[in-house]
Image (tube, rainbow, N blue to C red):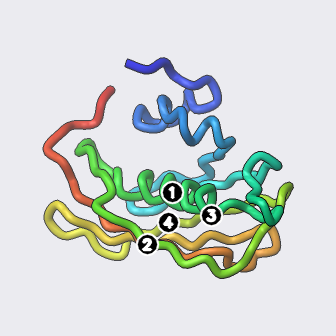
Amino acid sequence: MTEIIPEYADLRPMLQRDRASAALGMVIERDAPGEAVVSMVVRDDMLNGFAITHGGFVFALADTAFAIACNEDDVVTVAAGADITFLKATRGGQTLRAHARRRIRSGRTGLYDVTVTDDTGDVVAEFRGRSIATRDRMPR
């Protein structure tokens, strides 16, 4: 089992060992059933050749919020697919915030919308994630 990340020690087990989100400097601001808010400051090493935030990092932020929102019980739930629409470029030093909300959960599947905003409140991207619950239980 991977060791617990000190900054995430007070979070639930799924997040305590999330090395990818920690490495990107993500901060979990809200973790509630079917909803999550995660923020991240855009670092210089997250910029592409045009000096704007690489879309993969925006996607990663939205995907983390989606993962938190759809794992609301003790069943491991993973992404079945996701789409993102980029609406505004951002730059180094800006804080991005992803707000994920459950649209519907039916049986083993779910649909979640994530809105990513910048530090001015402008919408940067819209992400839609589709989840599938596995037959596995959440690790402790």
| Residue 14: x %, y % from top left | 41, 37
Give the residue pinned by disc 2.
Answer: 83
Of the image marks 1 and 2, the number of the one nearer the N terminus: 1
Query: Foreground mark, 2 or 4?
Result: 2
Q: Position of residue 133 (x, y in %)?
A: 21, 53
Tell me if label 3 and label 2 are in contact, CB under 8 Å: no
In three-dimensional space, the C-alpha distance between marks 2 and 4, rounded to whole angstroms, equals 14 Å
In the current view of this chain or complex, which residue is farthest to the right?
93
Q: CA distance from mark 1 to mark 4?
A: 6 Å
What residue does disc 4 label?
Answer: 100
Q: Earlier in the sequence, mark 3 or mark 2?
A: 3
> Residue 113 vs residue 37: left or right?
left
Depicted 56 relative to depicted 121: above or below: above
Query: N-terminal of the two: label 1 or label 4?
Result: 1
| Quadrant occupied by the C terminus | top left
Q: Amino acid at mark 1?
A: Ala
Secondary structure of the residue carrying tag 4 is: strand
Q: Residue furthest front?
A: 49
> Which tag, 4 or 3, sits closer to the chain's start?
3
Foreground disc of the pair 1, 3: 3
Position of residue 120 measured from the top left corner of the image (x, y, whole percent): 82, 74
| Residue drawn at (55%, 61%) of the image | 59
On the image, numbered disc 3 is attached to which residue? Answer: 55
How far separated are the C-alphas under marks 1 and 3?
16 Å
**Secondary element at image label 2:** strand
Labelled pair 4, 3 in contact (Cβ < 8 Å): no
Q: Residue at x 49, y 66 (%)?
A: 100
Amino acid residing under circle 3: Gly
